[in-house]
Image (cartoon, rainbow, N blue to C red):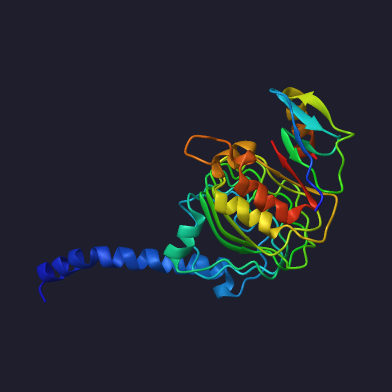
C-alpha cells in the first residue's frame, strides 16, 4: 500500500492548494504535495466566511 | 343539593374544568395544524417556533418538500420533547430537506434523522450552536448525497452516529472540536471506499483529544489508533484544521 503523505503547517498557518485547507493534511494516495502552500489563519478565516456566504 | 353544596362542588372541580378546557384547546389547535395526523407538507412548518409552543400531538412525517421545517426554532431539547409528547419525527420520505434545522441555535439533541429520500443535505444542521447529540444520521447506502455547510458552527457536537455512505462530495465537521472518538470513527467508517478526489475535514483539536494516547497528551493525530483508522480510507484526503 502506498504510504500516505502527511503535511504539517507551521504554527499560526494553514496549508492549502486552493481547494483543500488544513493544519495537518493526510493526503489521499492519489494526491501529491506539490501544489500546497501556506496562508495565515486570518486569510483562512476569510476564505471560510466567503464559502459560507455562498 | 343546596346552593352552598353546589358552589363547593364547583370550586372543587374548578381545576379539572380548567385543565379540560386547556386540553380541548390543545386538541383543537394541533388537530387543525397537523390535520389529525395526516399532514405531510411541512415546509417552514415550525420555522422560528418557541420552545414553549412546540408540543406536537401527532407524529411529524413530512414527504416531499420539508425545507427549513424547524429552522430558527428555539426548542431546547428537540429529541426529549418528541419523547415527552409521545410522537416521532420521520423524514425518511422527505425529498427536500435543505436547512431543516438551520440556525436552531438552542437545541441540544436530535433523534434519528433519516435522509434516505433526499439528495442534498446542505445546511441541514448549520448554525446549531448548542447541538450536542444526533442520535443517528441515516444516509443513502449509495453515497450519492451532497453535503455543503451541513454542520457549520456545530461547536458543541459530541455524539454523531452515521449509517450509510459518504461518497459524492467532501464532508466537514471542522467546527466540532468536541467530537468523540466514537463519532469520528463513525464518520471515517462511513466514507466511501470507491470514490476519489474528495476531502473530509475534521477539527484537529477533536482528533488530538479523542485519540490521545494518555490523558492530557493531546497527541491523537499522531497516534497509532488514528493512523490505523484512516489507513482504511486512503482514497480520501483527511484534513485537520
Q: Is residue A32 left or right of residue B129?
A: right
Q: Is residue B204 above or below residue B33?
A: above
Residue at the spot 81% in from the left edge and 39% down from the top edge: A20
Residue at the image point whose x is 78% and y is 67% from the top: B142
Q: Which one is in front, B122 or B155?
A: B155
Residue B205 in the figure: left or right of residue B149: left
Tell me where residue A5 sits by quadrant.
Answer: top right
Q: Front-most of A25 and B165?
A: A25
Which quarter of the rendered picture does the C terminus of chain B lie within? Answer: top right
**B86 horizontally vs A39: left or right:** left
| Total number of numbered discs in the rendering | 0
Figure quadrant of residue B211 = top right
Residue in front for this viewpoint, B98 or B190: B190
Q: Position of residue B3 (x, y in %)?
A: 12, 70
Q: Please tell me which residue is depicted at 72% across the width and 32% down the height of the picture.
A: A23
State the image coordinates of residue B229 (x, y, percent, origin top left): 66, 52
Q: Position of residue B188 (x, y in %)?
A: 68, 54
From this viewpoint, is residue B152 visible? yes
Q: In the image, is residue A50 above or below residue A28?
A: above
Q: Quadrant of the N terminus of chain B?
A: bottom left
Residue B70 can be seen, yes or no: no
Q: Nearer the viewer, residue B100 or A3?
A: A3
Image vertical order of residue B89 relative to residue A30, above or below: below
Residue at figure coordinates x 53%, y 47% from the top left: B74
Amino acid at each position: 500500500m502506498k504510504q500516505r503523505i502527511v503535511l504539517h503547517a507551521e504554527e499560526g498557518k494553514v496549508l492549502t492548494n486552493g481547494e483543500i485547507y488544513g493544519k495537518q493534511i493526510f493526503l489521499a494516495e492519489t494526491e501529491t504535495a506539490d501544489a500546497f502552500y501556506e496562508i495565515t489563519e486570518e486569510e483562512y478565516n476569510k476564505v471560510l466566511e466567503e464559502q459560507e456566504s455562498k | 343539593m343546596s346552593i352552598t353544596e353546589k358552589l363547593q362542588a364547583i370550586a372543587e372541580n374548578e381545576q379539572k374544568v380548567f385543565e379540560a378546557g386547556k386540553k380541548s384547546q390543545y386538541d383543537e389547535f394541533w388537530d387543525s395544524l397537523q390535520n389529525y395526523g395526516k399532514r405531510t407538507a411541512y415546509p417552514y412548518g415550525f420555522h422560528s417556533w418557541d420552545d414553549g409552543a412546540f408540543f406536537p400531538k401527532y407524529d411529524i412525517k413530512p414527504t416531499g418538500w420539508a425545507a427549513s421545517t424547524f429552522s430558527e426554532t428555539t426548542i431546547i431539547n428537540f429529541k426529549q420533547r418528541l419523547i415527552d409528547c409521545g410522537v416521532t419525527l420521520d423524514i425518511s420520505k422527505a425529498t427536500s430537506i435543505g436547512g431543516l434545522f438551520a440556525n436552531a441555535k438552542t437545541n441540544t439533541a436530535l433523534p434519528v434523522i433519516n435522509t434516505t429520500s433526499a439528495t442534498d443535505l446542505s445546511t441541514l444542521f448549520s448554525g446549531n450552536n448548542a447541538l450536542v447529540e444526533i442520535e443517528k444520521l441515516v444516509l443513502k447506502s449509495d453515497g450519492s448525497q451532497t453535503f455543503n455547510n451541513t454542520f457549520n458552527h456545530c461547536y458543541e457536537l459530541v455524539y454523531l452516529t452515521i449509517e450509510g455512505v459518504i461518497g459524492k462530495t467532501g464532508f466537514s465537521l471542522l467546527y466540532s472540536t468536541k467530537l468523540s472518538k466514537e463519532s469520528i470513527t463513525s464518520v471515517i467508517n462511513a466514507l466511501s471506499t470507491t470514490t476519489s478526489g474528495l476531502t473530509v475535514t475534521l477539527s484537529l483539536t477533536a482528533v488530538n483529544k479523542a485519540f490521545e494516547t494518555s490523558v492530557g497528551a493531546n497527541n491523537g493525530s499522531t497516534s497509532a489508533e488514528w493512523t490505523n483508522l484512516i489507513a482504511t480510507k486512503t482514497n480520501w484526503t483527511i484534513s485537520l484544521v
